[in-house]
Image (tube, rainbow, N blue to C red):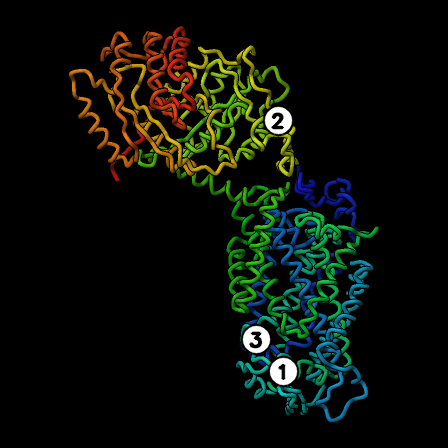
Amino acid sequence: MSEHTPLISHGVCGLPVSSTFCGLGSETMGEAPAHSDSPRKLNTFFGVMVPTILSMFSIVLFLRTGFVVGHAGLLQGLLMLVVAYTIISLTILSICAISTNGAVQGGGAYFMISRSLGPEFGGSIGLMFFLAKVCACGVYVLGLVEAILDVFGRDPALLETAVLRVLPQGYWFTVLYSSAILLLCLLVCLVGAHIYARTAFLILLLVTVTVVSILISPLIVSPQDFVIAHRGPGNQTHFYNVSYTGFNATTLRNNLNSGYTLDYSTNKVMSFASVFAVMFTSCTGIMAGANMSGELKNPSVSIPRGTIAAVLYTFIIYLLLFLLVSSTCDRALLVQDYGFFQRINVWPPFVTIGVYCASLSAAMSSLIGASRILHALALDQLFGLPLAPAAITSRSGNPWVAVVYTWGLAQCVVFAGQLNTIAGLVTVFYLLAYAAVDLACLALEWASAPNFRPTFQVFSWHSCLLGIVSCLVMMFVINPVYSSASVALLLLLLLFLHYRSPTSSWGYISQALIFHQVRKYLLMLDVRKDHVKFWRPQVLLMVANPRSSCQLINFVNQLKKGGLFVLGHVQLGDLDSLPSDPVQQQYNFWLSLVDKLGVKAFVDLTLSLSVRQGTQHLLRITGLGGMKPNTLVLGFYDNCSPEDYFLHDPAFCKSSLGPSAEGDNFGVDLPSLQAHFPPVRHMESPRWLSADEYVGIVSDAIKMNKNVCLGRYFFQLEGEGRESRTEGAERTIDVWPLDLLSPGHGALVDVGSLFLLQMACVLNMATRWRRARMRIFLCVEAESGDQGWVAKEETFRELLGMLRIRASIKIVPWDAVAQLCGRRPEPDDDPSKTAPVLSERFLSAVNRLLMDYSSQAAVRFLYLPRPPTLSSQSQQYLAQLDAMTQGLGPTLLIHGLTPVTCTDL
């Protein structure tokens, strides 16, 4: 699978590579043609440089240069220019790095972010970037209307009305003119992006001629004085005497410092943040070329080259214009007439044509760019049905429905009525998108993935991090309210996409970062520094068939206490006689099982000639570094017919087919999961594991210094399912720390009994068991003349207090049971050499004792005797365990070898 493979199960579709990239044919999803169906006709100049330059010139160049210098002064204006271009330059480095690391398809910035950070982050940022482009389109249209009304608008404040001033002005007229211009942009964009790109070159020529005329006008036009009239608050007309001085040192000196005053278009006092917000809209066009990636012949080459060249060109032009206007125009002219370039130009129509062309082309560029982002989002189906129609394209590959969607939203934006009103929102959206691009590049760099090999090398993680910080800082400097709202919207989109779970085959940068960090911390996890104070269970649970083991899996998940939990399974077979390893194909089914059960477990499978040998392999090789199992858990070996858990749990029943039955995003649906695991064993079915081999597995684990737990009757345990909400308020945990099969042999407190207590305490700390009552049963021979058990009981109570274990102690007289044992073991006896011969009467008495005291317990913890060394006694050993636990209910037999308790701080 590649990043272009259609996404599985959620209908989320990846973007297929073009046939020119790797020889693959085009792919489609339903009725929506993939990106490779769109014609790729544009080169670096026409596809990247031209739209980027026009987007960055737009209305700021002709209508807001004087606004910036007039309010902020030359020094602060240059500071704004440098800060803005520094921010976009850092982002451009990231764009160049990402775009030269593989084939870039349609969608531009969205494609880069989503394929780097995954669908959740990519989809949310992509939608934010789409909204930014829509708002920018509205800004450019409003700027164009402002320029038109400056020339043709009827102004009641003027004493004499010029012949050309025939257009009525007002809020609703502004909306009407904006709607007409948007309709024109819609018609052009419906023709196709490549047609617009060709005509954009002619527009660029006109804009360039206009810029040249502005630069040479001070050498030709003589100083002039003007009278400017504005209608202010209260419907009063204010007149201003302003001057064009030509190149003048006094004018330059007066314009050096800031002079923030009232903005006549919004009647609000300007500040550094508000002026910077307007000026930064000139920098929002750096991705105009990247957004045309679906139409570029070679996006990986064209995007970096064209974008860098366009940014350098526009920076030089803005720098020259800032110096020019601050040296030739007094401050009053700059702040009271945003269209002053027409007044001081050698031929005023030049500026008029330039403004109209630049604003119109920037609006169309934003409309096309936004529609391409929306089209890419629709193809990936991250937001489901609401965006599904936007995936429809014409025969030529033009996403006309996405264009119509974008036009409709841009129509809503123009109801703002004034350019400066929404400039802050546009800037915040763009800064957030730029920060996301920097974050994508930073994540790729920090992940140190071998396949991140961009041909563009002029970047580092320092530049990415600086770009992120500078974008976020400037966002909140410009408008804290808009910034907070945009971040909140981003988080809501992230949560929506996360819970919608769109799993992709694009690759997740989070997985690469997690791998990088986990490897680093695993190396730091030194087993030589282990201490008993920080011990926790690290469990390997051997599972023959999950159908009969799900309850035990859920129970052990409660026992792990944040430690390692691994489900192990041995597939019988010989690799030499097989064409391929059958184990590798099973991992997805087992991982899907883990997801269904909702347990936090790893899966480790192996192929072996015997279960015993396979278990040895898993005990040795499972885990890594300090994360290795210290406890082996097995199901009990008996003749009971196992229950099929899949028939009772709603998550596995066919009657509950719903969204969960469609699959788990990795190609494993419920029927295939059920079919993969064989039916449970019947009474007459042959066993894959003999009694000798089972006891041998227990012995092997003890030899390898692993603690051993045997679980019996856990299919009877209730309240352990994924949907269970029980917290054990009515449940009890019974602990029998004495070796009941060897009365008088062991001490009341040894390593094994302390381990057993620790495991019971760990269970009592689990969420679903935290309200359960723990009871500890001490078996004593109270009728004998020896009263030493009283002191032992008191000592045991003190020990529980020191270990901070909250439990009630129950004294169980068992003189009658102990007398049935027969020969008492001597101190020198080794029970591992020879299993004690225990009568059926004694075993029945022990079982009755347990039934009398623990029949109502939710789970019982019993001491597991050490298995015999002689394999001939394995049957006898298992028979004794079977007789002792017969009919008890959920029981865990535990043999502990590891010191796990500590009374020190």
Amino acid on which disc 2 is placed: Gln
Query: Of 486 and 83, which appears nearest the observer?
Result: 486
Horizontally, residue 552 falls left or right of residue 895, namely right
Whether label 2 touches label 3, CB < 8 Å: no
Horizontally, residue 862 falls left or right of residue 7, namely left
Image position, residue 410 (x, y; %): 71, 65
Report which residue position mark 3 lands on.
Answer: 77
Amino acid on which disc 3 is placed: Gly
Label for residue 264?
1
Horizontally, residue 420 falls left or right of residue 213, namely left
Label 2 to label 1: alpha-carbon separation: 72 Å
Image position, residue 372 (x, y; %): 72, 55
Q: In terms of sequence position, does the residue under pointer 2 or pointer 1 come before the other?
A: 1
Label 2 to label 3: alpha-carbon separation: 68 Å
Report which residue position mark 2 lands on.
Answer: 674
- Is 321 above or below relative to 674? below
